[in-house]
Image (cartoon, rainbow, N blue to C red):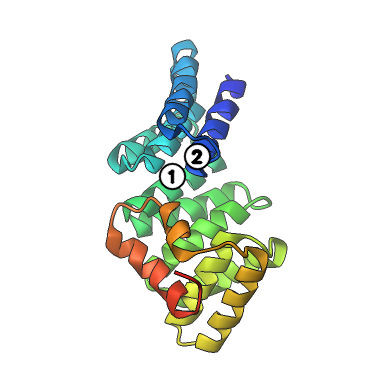
């Protein structure tokens, strides 16, 4: 079953990032992995993690949140379950819950926590806590300086803080690391439930000089 779990995550990533042309079939293959695991053991919480991951990028947000809750119920000590639940809630627009879940994920796994911190930073940004979003994204970039999600969150946070020159500097660094980056292409990878939430994040990127 762990192999099915890992395969399900891999297939979801392949569809999410456009590495497979037939996204619908690839997402369904990931769901099939989860359902095969549950057919063997209904208590295998990681299967629900895969299901919720797929549903998020299919923009089935309510179903994703529900499946994420089942993953936590079945695996209450899993940092991955809490981190992924934070991501599901963040894209669904439940930013306070997203922060709470990401903080719990980091308490459960204080060593490997960069993935959780990135989603926490983005949720803090949407809550209007631009200082915290800036600080968390900056901490991640000290270890992972090319991480696009952290870079974009940092640019947006700096812009909202009125630190426009710094935002433009980070935007140039982002383009140096990712020369083909465009805001429009990046926005397609962010499955927010509400367009207003997506616009709140990506409009500062354009204002900081990143190509449309």
Do the residues bearing badges 1 and 2 touch, measured as CB atoms within 8 Å? yes
Considering the image in quadrants, where does the N terminus appear? top right
Q: In which quarter of the image is residue 141?
A: bottom right
- In the rendering, which numbered label is found on residue 85? 1
Residue 58 vs residue 122, the one in the foreground: 58
Q: Name the residue under label 2.
A: 81
Considering the image in quadrants, where does the C terminus appear? bottom left
Cα distance, mark 1 to mark 2?
6 Å
Q: How busy is the neighbourhood of tag 1: few (under 14 within 10 Å), some, or many (20 plus)?
A: many
Q: What element carries label 2?
A: helix
What's the residue at 64%, 73% (across, down)? 173
Query: Could one spot residue 77 in this view of the protein?
Result: no
Question: Image check: 117 left or right of 69?
Answer: right
Q: Quadrant of residue 203?
A: bottom left
Query: Could one spot residue 145 in this view of the protein?
Result: yes
- In the rendering, which numbered label is found on residue 35? none
Q: Position of residue 70 (x, y in %)?
A: 39, 32
Q: Is mark 1 on a helix, strand or loop?
A: helix
What's the residue at 49%, 37% (across, down)? 15
Residue 18 vs residue 138, the one in the foreground: 18
Q: Position of residue 83 (x, y in %)?
A: 51, 47
Question: Image check: 14 left or right of 55?
Answer: right
Q: Position of residue 166 (x, y in %)?
A: 57, 84
Residue 198 vs residue 129, the one in the foreground: 198
How many numbered marks, from 0 up? 2
What's the residue at 58%, 67% (across, down)? 151
Q: How busy is the neighbourhood of tag 2: few (under 14 within 10 Å), some, or many (20 plus)?
A: many
């Amino acid at each position: 079953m762990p192999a099915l779990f890992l395969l399900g995550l891999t297939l979801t990533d392949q569809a999410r990032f456009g590495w497979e042309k037939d996204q619908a079939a690839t997402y369904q293959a990931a769901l099939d992995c989860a359902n095969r695991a549950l057919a063997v053991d209904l208590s295998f919480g990681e299967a629900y993690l895969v299901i919720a991951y797929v549903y998020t990028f299919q923009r089935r947000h309510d179903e994703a949140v529900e499946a994420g809750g089942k993953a936590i119920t079945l695996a209450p000590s899993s940092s991955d379950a809490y981190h992924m639940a934070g991501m599901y809630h963040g894209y669904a627009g439940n930013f306070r819950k997203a922060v709470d879940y990401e903080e719990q994920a980091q308490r459960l796994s204080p060593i490997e926590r960069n993935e959780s911190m990135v989603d926490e930073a983005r949720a803090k940004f949407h809550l209007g806590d631009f200082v915290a979003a800036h600080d968390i994204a900056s901490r991640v970039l000290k270890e992972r300086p090319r991480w696009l999600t952290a870079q974009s969150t940092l640019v947006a946070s700096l812009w909202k803080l009125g630190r426009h020159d710094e935002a433009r500097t980070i935007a140039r660094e982002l383009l140096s690391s990712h020369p083909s980056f465009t805001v429009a292409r990046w926005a397609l990878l962010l499955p927010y439930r509400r367009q207003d939430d997506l616009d709140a994040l990506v409009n500062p990127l354009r204002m900081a000089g990143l190509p449309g």
